[in-house]
Amino acid sequence: MDFRLTDDQRALRAGMRGLLAARYPRERLRSLADCPGGPPAPDRDLWQALGEAGFFALRLAEQDGGAGLGLPEAVLLFEEAGRALLPGPLVATQLAAGLVPGAAEGACPVTALDRPGTAEHLASAEAVLLLDGRAARVLRARPGGAPRALRARPARSVDPTTPLHLVRQLPRPPDGTAATVPADAPRLCREAALLTAAQQLGSAFRTVELAVSHARRRSQFGRPVGAFQAVQHLCAEMLVRAELARAAVYAASLAAEPEGTAEIAAAKLLADSAAVRNARDCLQVHGGLGFTWEADIHLHLKRAWLRASQWQSAADSEELLANTLLREASHLPEGPHASDATDVLDAENVTA
Amino acid sequence: MDFRLTDDQRALRAGMRGLLAARYPRERLRSLADCPGGPPAPDRDLWQALGEAGFFALRLAEQDGGAGLGLPEAVLLFEEAGRALLPGPLVATQLAAGLVPGAAEGACPVTALDRPGTAEHLASAEAVLLLDGRAARVLRARPGGAPRALRARPARSVDPTTPLHLVRQLPRPPDGTAATVPADAPRLCREAALLTAAQQLGSAFRTVELAVSHARRRSQFGRPVGAFQAVQHLCAEMLVRAELARAAVYAASLAAEPEGTAEIAAAKLLADSAAVRNARDCLQVHGGLGFTWEADIHLHLKRAWLRASQWQSAADSEELLANTLLREASHLPEGPHASDATDVLDAENVTA
Amino acid sequence: MDLTLTKEEEDFRDRLRAWLHDTLPRLPPEPPAEDWPARRAHDCAWQRALHDAGYAGLHWPAHAGGQGATPTEYLIFIEETERAGAPYVGANFVGLLHAGPTIAAEGTAAQRARWLPPILRGDEIWCQGFSEPDAGSDLASLRTRAVRDGDSYVVTGSKIWTSHAEVADWCELLVRTDPAAPRHRGISWLALPMNAPGVTVRPLRTLAGTTEFAEVFLDEVRVPVTHRVGPENDGWRVTMVTLSYERGTAFAGEVVACRRTLARLARTARANGRWDDPVLRRRLGRLHAEFTALWRLVQWNTSEAAHAARTGGHGNPGPGASVFKLRYSQARQKLYEAAAEVLGPESLDTRHEWTAQRLSSLSYTIAAGTSQIQRNIIAERILGLPRGR
Amino acid sequence: MDLTLTKEEEDFRDRLRAWLHDTLPRLPPEPPAEDWPARRAHDCAWQRALHDAGYAGLHWPAHAGGQGATPTEYLIFIEETERAGAPYVGANFVGLLHAGPTIAAEGTAAQRARWLPPILRGDEIWCQGFSEPDAGSDLASLRTRAVRDGDSYVVTGSKIWTSHAEVADWCELLVRTDPAAPRHRGISWLALPMNAPGVTVRPLRTLAGTTEFAEVFLDEVRVPVTHRVGPENDGWRVTMVTLSYERGTAFAGEVVACRRTLARLARTARANGRWDDPVLRRRLGRLHAEFTALWRLVQWNTSEAAHAARTGGHGNPGPGASVFKLRYSQARQKLYEAAAEVLGPESLDTRHEWTAQRLSSLSYTIAAGTSQIQRNIIAERILGLPRGR
């Protein structure tokens, strides 16, 4: 057992951070956020650069043109993407690598849906992965709009860097518009939840950094605000949330089925909380400055809201985890703690 | 409109505080808590003194030997009782005044039940008020034990000053053991919830005082702990909880039916939270000293747990309040905010 | 303890209701959110209507041109106008709720005569120049300088979080007139004409994407000394006399609105099926308790203010307003979190009013004193804990 | 990133499992909670059994008589003994987890030879005399004085929160040997024989009604100078070298136990019908996530410690342990709050194990550094924020 990152994993992560620093610096993020016509489509050049770096093909076997790596490595890369607030249907496109031609190379952005609700980048994606059944299906895009079968309409997206559609329904199989592809849809949904959690994790750590650096620099009442216990304790709780989420996300990337299902639910639940609540606390630490458009904090918060609504909601995860608990309990011996099964109000012990 | 206490109400409250200071000083509380055989029965002398002071008959009409006062005055007295952690089935006995002979005079302690669960002071009460239906019923006590019809067994009470039984069932009417009395049981249940909330309120303010006085006196790291922002902020939130609960409890005591039902639910919910959470925070402010038996904090916490479980649980109150909300909404005009009723996913607006 | 209205209060309410019932249907529709000149015109027309009906400056003293209403009547006014869906105070906020009362309390007769009637008639709009980019919660550390030059001050610096700056005629401005004095001393209160040379307004975009605030840059702006209200270097006290209004009844109307929103959330949840989720339902139930109690707290604070006014006090909500402000700001954020839960996917669409409100609610635990500052105030001024360090 | 066990680790686990399977059924039943002599005897017998099987001082270095196991093996030991329902470390806690490691790290050869073998064999019990009534979280402000008199120190003062004081042979004692030195200087570490004249033990009743702690009063107790471990006035450093153990793996076994309790809560809720309440069910689901992640955090910290040990570091969990301690103490309290919800009325009966645990869980955010102190440590030592004031 050695939970720490291997040297290869560290190098992979550093490479991703370097790529993003070069190809997606903060100015790019800000210019996307300021697009007058609303959130733009993903940048095809950047998309292709990611493809060339092996981001999408990461988990394909080497003979299929991939890097033959696994979920742990994917999680590290998506954590970096979340940290940098890289936009685009990254999760769906990695899932689609090997299923949709061009996805693995970064030539074909793919979005995905597991149920009616919101779909990101629907107008610019070239295909939609439908994961609402046992089998995965692929719906080809309609140039410049959403596929008719989805009965979608564009939203004015709360996240300024992610265009959204509200989707009313998914076509029922069998359906001429969507073709079945050889993949296990529930497994892809779980992987999507995990990779989404990894992005939340990156965002959660980034807002810790933003809060701490502001608290060190900003002075109020004659001293850095980071010297006030109230601010210190906000920052401390932010770090704790992020660290707990990290342990959960990394562990979930290593877990085998069926433990993986519960571990991924735990990871999504904790990473969603960490991303949303850390962005909120980061805003509070920044005071009025955090409420401005110019600060990046709202971009983290809004993306965190969006991701929390994708794949597994908190209610889904909590119910799944509760049921896992019950299954685990059935394997437990009654043991020395048998008292938990007794009913103290039972008929034998009445009237004293 | 003048929400403030009248001079008469202030005098009434001061009188009760004076009575308790004289007849139930802290040493009495502590000696009860240290009773080796578990929580004792209520002190009959004290009970009688309360009766003579008009505590139980407070709301009976003057021609029936009462003071002809109302719920607002009762709430003020129960707040004082909660502040001093006065034990005994105070709420039930006031409800029983005029229904059970001797209750109004303090000659006859009465306990009450609205459903199976816990009953306080069951072995020492002379009667049990049953409030599980539309009509109220009275069950006479069995000397030295619990009435057989309740199928009760004694618990080792978590509250060292309140003996508890676990009651398995209430006798079904018509039942030879319990006699119907002329009272509206649902109304008595609401009043019991309100008076219980008033006790929680008194306890919640008392733990604010305990925390603040400790934080002023106790030094750590070369200064009073109350100068640390973390401690200041705990105390501030405690006060806010108590003040909000006070506004809710006092208002509920004034509300007419049917608003009263929702107002009482709100009062119970907020007062339960304030009492439990303030006791918890008070303990935290005290550090290790708060964890000792000698400190009074645990007595407040344990009584608060007990009272929170009595009459209306949080789930009961929340569901009731949610339904009230829905009824209120049905009276609202669609008005300028009509958008809340639209479904943006509706069929007219699809596919853009 | 009495929450029923007196005969006089009921009469006041009935007259107001009748007038609102009569007047509101004749008002033009609300202009678009980002059209500031249209909003100014709309808000001023409403103020003029109030003025003509005898409701302008309801809570102002009579010597300032107000109606001298009791705090209870003022609360009835807030509740009834909100319930009837009347326009908000809007662009008249600073004039009616802070600059005006400050001038009424601290201004000379000439200053009152010059500035108060146009506020009451809806002829002139005021904005507030207190906050500065480098000051934040530490308002007393403001750095905008005013140097005396003959009959004028020459003012240089910048202000931030100024609402309605684009359409305001006047700005109540805090400036440092004695840089050598301790932080809370050496500050003066000036009435700045917004059309003076050297004043530049730049809209400030908030995270909600809207521009309800602005930055105001002041480059050697000349302000006549006669525009100073109160003694030189005494501006901190002058301001604080009335600043707590912002934390008192100012939110009362919002509580009424929040309670209505909460009922609409329930109705929407019932319509879209989310009502069947007990977790959400109980959350709405708890919010109902919260806002019920907050409204009772408003009534409590109003009763205290009415008593103080009767016995010659200020009617100033005082530090107790911090208790309300702290809890209300949290409750408002929870309300719109619950709204997002009710809306589901639609909560990610900013066209929904509740999504816009969710974003703007994020400022509530920061603006007008962060929650951290409110807790300090409660701990030190109400609970008497030692000064935190 | 690898959570699978190596071949060596699996072999270690399998041997341990087999031994536990063989040994545990032959153990006598646990004595009553308040019978301290019986508990001492029980705990010592278990320690002797571990010793004879080669598991005593598993994580101690070989030169101290330990097994030199890796942090991972030690974690496997904790997990497996807990899962198998083996006795807790109990009365041997201080000897094995703090006093012993301190003597191993800082003691002379003679001191190691005198004190370590009886700890490992379960022959001698240690208790801890660090906290004082007036010190609390501010441990460095301790006031118990030790005055040098010939070959002895004469010690006067009092200690609080001492577990097992009634049955301990030795107490690791922090005393002030130089009252003039700054707070963290002038402290020394002494091994106090509990049977020395002038030592009085008074049980301390906690809010749970139990007496698992005691106060220790010291009235001119003579302690030989040879009982001092480490240099005079250097006791703060001597203590801190190993104190963080208390915040690291010490809770690992409890996390395993909490996870089992949580599953039992689910089973009980299913049996008594409360499982049908989605609010409670989802709360249990969230706690499942919480404890799953806490266990992963234990594994993460263990991996870091194992790495440090391999590369010559201390294997000291360091300030990162504060992250775990802060969250775990909250989670444990939430667990027993949920238990009360599952139990309903029965939660008010202290005979139920979970009710007793609920009460004792209240100390978790206070003992071994309050949550407030943990947040300070995280803010200042991990995040590098300026020193709070």
Image (tube, coloured by chain):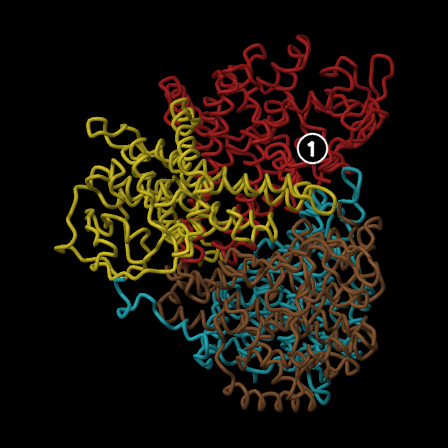
Chain colours: A cyan, B yellow, C red, D brown
Amino acid type shown at disc 1: Thr
Q: What element carries label 1?
A: strand
Residue visible at 66% across and 91% down in the picture: D11
| Mark 1 Cα shell of 10 Å, populated few (<14), some (14-19), many (≥20) | many
Rendered image quadrant of residue B8: top left
Closest to the observer, D356 or B170:
D356
Residue visible at 35% across and 31% down in the picture: B73
Question: How many badges with numbers are in the image?
Answer: 1
Identify the subunit bearing mark 1.
C
Left/right placement of residue D215 relative to residue B261 reads right
Closest to the observer, B3 or B332:
B3
Image coordinates of residue D265 in percent, x first then y, are 45, 69
Rendered image quadrant of residue D278: bottom left
**In this view, B282 is above or below A41:** above
Closest to the observer, D178 or B317:
D178
Image coordinates of residue C43 in percent, x first then y, are 57, 27
Image coordinates of residue B85 in percent, x first then y, are 43, 43
Image coordinates of residue C335 in percent, x first then y, are 51, 47
Residue visible at 76% across and 60% down in the picture: D382
Considering the image in quadrants, where does the N terminus of chain A appear?
Answer: bottom right
The residue where tag 1 is placed is C162
**In this view, C73 is above or below A255:** above
